[in-house]
Amino acid sequence: MSAPPRPHAVRVFEVGPRDGLQNEALLVPLEQKLQIIAKLAAAGLTDIEVGAFVHPRWVPQMADTDELVRRLPARDGVRYWSLVPNERGLDRALAAGATHLGLLASASETHSLKNINRSVDVVRAENRRVAARARAAGVTLRGYVSVAFGCPYEGDVPLDRVLRLAEEYLELGVAQVALGDTTGMAGPVQVRHAARRALDAFGAERVAFHLHDTRGTGLVHAMAALEEGVTTLDSSTGGIGGCPYAPGAAGNLATEDLLYLLERLGIASGVALPGVVAASRWLCDELGLSIPSRYFRYAMADS
């Protein structure tokens, strides 16, 4: 069977302000978070993950998510997303006026316990309650399956288990499911196989891939996903961040690197690469963050 044609356009889902900053030691002030989000939106990114309604004791960087969401300016075509791990988080999100929320579930029991101190079944039950209330309030939902390509504690994760979680999310009414390579354990053949099965089961509009570059293979995996017809890819400006409760999870796929790949493939994204580079430079200059993106380093050497 021949592979599907490469997509003509790809939706780049920016996770830097949440998944990027949550793993940084520096506590970024609210005003600076608003500035970086504005720069990313100005660059043409239309889906930006900005925060998480979690207990600040566990993720101090996200302590100001309520106020951040309240203060985000409306911008035509831009969707601001936040994570909600439970009904308490949903209460806060609704009070803050959030309209786009992400649900979390791990494909590994051990990772779930280490990450959010709850079993997978407890999380699934909580997600059912959260989804019902959120949809009744008119909120658009996205579902994340963590460690979908391998767990640092349990090793290989069966794809059937991952797809069952994805299917359950869609039955709850989420608009899209993101399969997460949380610790960068995937391989290109594995990504192709997962993409083929997920797209066949759910359709391109409802599937996203959240890839990491932990072992230097993030773009290889992005290419594999694109070759199978995936049309939504998550990335983080500058390649910052990762999961603080998964060993080795640092190394999000850099938005700049992904955009350059898409440009060279002739795939439209609607995002201005120089604008994202400028946002990463601001993170470097204003916050002193180290920027792993290869394209960013090239652009700075050439500037």
Image: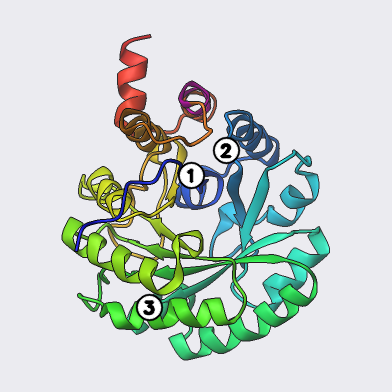
Q: Nearer the viewer, residue 157 or 245?
A: 157
Q: Are marks 3 and 1 in contact (CB under 8 Å)?
A: no
* Residue placed under numbered mark 2 in the picture: 45
Q: Is label 2 in a helix, a strand or a loop?
A: loop
**Per the image, is 208 magenta?**
no
Q: Amino acid at mark 3?
A: Leu
Cα–Cα gap, marks 2 and 1: 7 Å
Residue 244 in the image, given as x and y percentages of width and height: 41, 59
Q: Are marks 2 and 1 in contact (CB under 8 Å)?
A: yes
Highlighted magenta segment, given as a residue range: 273-279
Label 1 packing within 10 angstroms: few (<14), some (14-19), many (20+): many
Q: Is residue 292 above or below residue 105?
A: above
Numbered circle sitting on residue 12: 1
Q: Nearer the viewer, residue 180 or 281?
A: 180
Q: Is label 3 in a helix, a strand or a loop?
A: helix
Q: How is the image coloured?
A: rainbow
Give the quarter of the figure containing the C terminus: top left
Cα–Cα gap, marks 3 and 1: 22 Å
Q: How many marks?
A: 3
Per the picture, the main secondary structure of the magenta-coloured stretch is helix
Q: On the image, which quarter does residue 115 sit in?
A: bottom left
Residue 66 in the image, given as x and y percentages of width and height: 74, 56
Numbered circle sitting on residue 132: none
The residue sitting at the front extreme is 1
Cα–Cα gap, marks 3 and 2: 28 Å
Label 3 packing within 10 angstroms: few (<14), some (14-19), many (20+): many
Residue 215 in the image, given as x and y percentages of width and height: 20, 49
Q: Is label 1 in a helix, a strand or a loop?
A: strand
